[in-house]
Image (cartoon, helix red, strand yellow):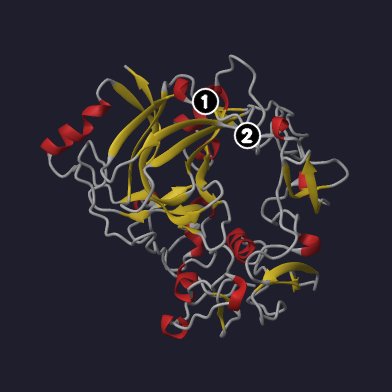
């Protein structure tokens, strides 16, 4: 059952109280209204629907000192400015596969879209990242089309353009403060073939990296020399940014068991969990479908988990289910349950239990009879290249041979070429605050 998510007037949210001598203060309700998925704080509740309060359009709250963005001194508004700014593209050829983050299909009343991108962070208490999925913002039209999932892009002025074409949108990730490892925005590459012309370059590069015909596939980008894009940062964002490539040997997704067959075995998956609600909610049984079946979810104090606005809405609507999975996560006996829109055989019927890796790493993990994988067998240690950002737009071309594993998980076989089976690309940010823009992402080859 779908319910509109309406914004409570901020005048009603002005009060903010502390928690005594616990050393922890409540999150600012005005910030929670703008970022309902703020770590460690439950989403606000609209009393008229008992559903979560979500802004109608993406909001980018200030971070750190809240400095005003001076904008880029590198301009693209005249032919002379473009000649200077675009000199870095001389001697290379860009792929027709690209992400410019403009509104899909040229529809003016839609927001820009980072199609098939998703973002995550390290769950530091009080931290947050924006934006959310484009379909979570009800003020953006056409976002319930299944072809449109991904992060909402941000409107910019005078974005990178070497041919004089208008560029009004870019991927913009902002948030903080992150104290553990940071986070990232990731994009599975083969999905770009999903809604495009079968003769497109993304489809032509698509390969069955695993070899068993599963839907999760990869791209063979070995005809190119590297990755290219434009990027800049806001004044309060860190200058460091990492570009991460996952291939068939390192990808968590390609290692998962699929209905077609088991995981490929190049690396092993691991899933961390929390035995209690970490968002300040209460773990209560919530009606999950029209048959009256229940699961346990973290809901705000005082909320009746049986209210229609709290239940996981229309489970056939992936956007509704994904938003409520984010705001009201499973807990208790359902902590490790995969979401309805992304069934995961590997974690079905697992429990959230503590495990100690010889005293070096102790935490809670989702596992059954078999213990979680040791660090040197795990997935996720992809190929990384570091860049340094300024507040000006800059063109980056990163050759594939510049990417190296970090060394925290399983090592890939020697002499393998990662670009032959690329599963995903991600932009990773580290501890502290992040505020970065990326535009016109593509592959390149030297001429």
Left or right of 63? Residue 415 is right
Numbered disc 2: secondary structure: loop
- Residue 119 placement (x, y as % from top left): 52, 50
Quadrant where the image shows the C terminus: top left
Q: Which residue is mark 2?
A: 251
Residue 320 disc label: none
Left or right of 412? Residue 4 is left
Q: Is residue 265 above or below residue 17?
A: above
- Residue 349 placement (x, y as % from top left): 83, 52
Q: Is residue 283 above or below residue 169?
A: below
Q: Which residue is mark 1?
A: 404
Between disc 2 and disc 1, the foreground one is 1
Q: Where on the picture, by quarter, is residue 298?
A: bottom right
Q: Would residue 134 be seen by someone viewing this image from the given angle?
A: yes
Comparing 223 with 274, the one in front is 274
Left or right of 59? Residue 146 is right
- Residue 437 placement (x, y as % from top left): 36, 47
């Amino acid at each position: 059952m779908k319910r509109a998510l309406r914004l409570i007037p901020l005048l009603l949210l002005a009060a903010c109280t502390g928690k005594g001598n616990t050393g922890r203060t409540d999150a600012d309700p005005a910030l929670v209204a703008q970022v309902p998925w703020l770590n460690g704080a439950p989403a606000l509740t609209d009393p008229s629907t008992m559903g979560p309060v979500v802004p109608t359009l993406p909001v980018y709250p200030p971070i750190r000192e809240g400095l005003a963005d001076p904008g880029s001194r590198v301009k693209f508004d005249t032919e002379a400015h473009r000649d200077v700014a675009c000199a870095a593209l001389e001697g290379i050829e860009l792929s027709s596969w690209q992400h410019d983050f403009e509104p899909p299909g040229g529809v003016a009343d839609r927001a820009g879209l980072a199609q098939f991108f998703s973002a995550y962070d390290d769950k530091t208490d009080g931290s947050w990242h924006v934006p959310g999925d484009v379909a979570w913002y009800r003020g953006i039209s056409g976002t319930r089309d299944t072809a449109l999932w991904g992060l909402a892009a941000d409107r910019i002025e005078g974005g990178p353009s070497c041919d004089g074409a208008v560029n009004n949108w870019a991927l913009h990730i902002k948030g903080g403060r992150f104290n553990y490892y940071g986070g990232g925005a990731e994009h599975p590459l083969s999905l770009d073939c999903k809604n495009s012309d079968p003769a497109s370059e993304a489809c032509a590069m698509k390969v069955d990296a695993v070899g068993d015909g599963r839907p999760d596939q990869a791209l063979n980008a070995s005809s190119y020399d590297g990755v290219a894009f434009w990027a800049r940062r806001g004044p309060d964002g860190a200058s460091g940014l990492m570009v991460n490539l996952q291939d068939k040997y390192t990808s968590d997704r390609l290692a998962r068991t699929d209905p077609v067959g088991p995981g490929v075995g190049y690396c092993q998956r691991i899933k961390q969990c929390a035995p209690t609600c970490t968002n300040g909610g209460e773990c209560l049984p919530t009606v999950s479908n029209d048959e009256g079946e229940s699961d346990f979810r973290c809901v705000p104090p005082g909320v009746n988990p049986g209210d229609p606005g709290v239940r996981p809405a229309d489970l056939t609507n992936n956007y509704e289910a994904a938003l409520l999975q984010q705001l009201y996560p499973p807990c208790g006996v359902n902590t490790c349950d995969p979401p309805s829109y992304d069934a995961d055989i590997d974690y079905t019927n697992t429990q959230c239990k503590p495990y100690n890796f010889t005293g070096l790493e102790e935490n809670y993990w989702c596992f059954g009879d078999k213990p979680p994988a040791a660090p040197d067998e795990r997935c996720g240690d992809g190929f990384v290249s570091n860049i340094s950002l300024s507040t000006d737009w800059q063109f980056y071309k990163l050759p594939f041979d510049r990417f190296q594993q970090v060394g925290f998980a399983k090592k890939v076989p020697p002499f393998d070429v990662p670009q032959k089976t690329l599963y995903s690309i991600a932009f990773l940010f580290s501890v502290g605050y992040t505020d970065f823009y990326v535009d016109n992402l593509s592959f390149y080859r030297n001429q």
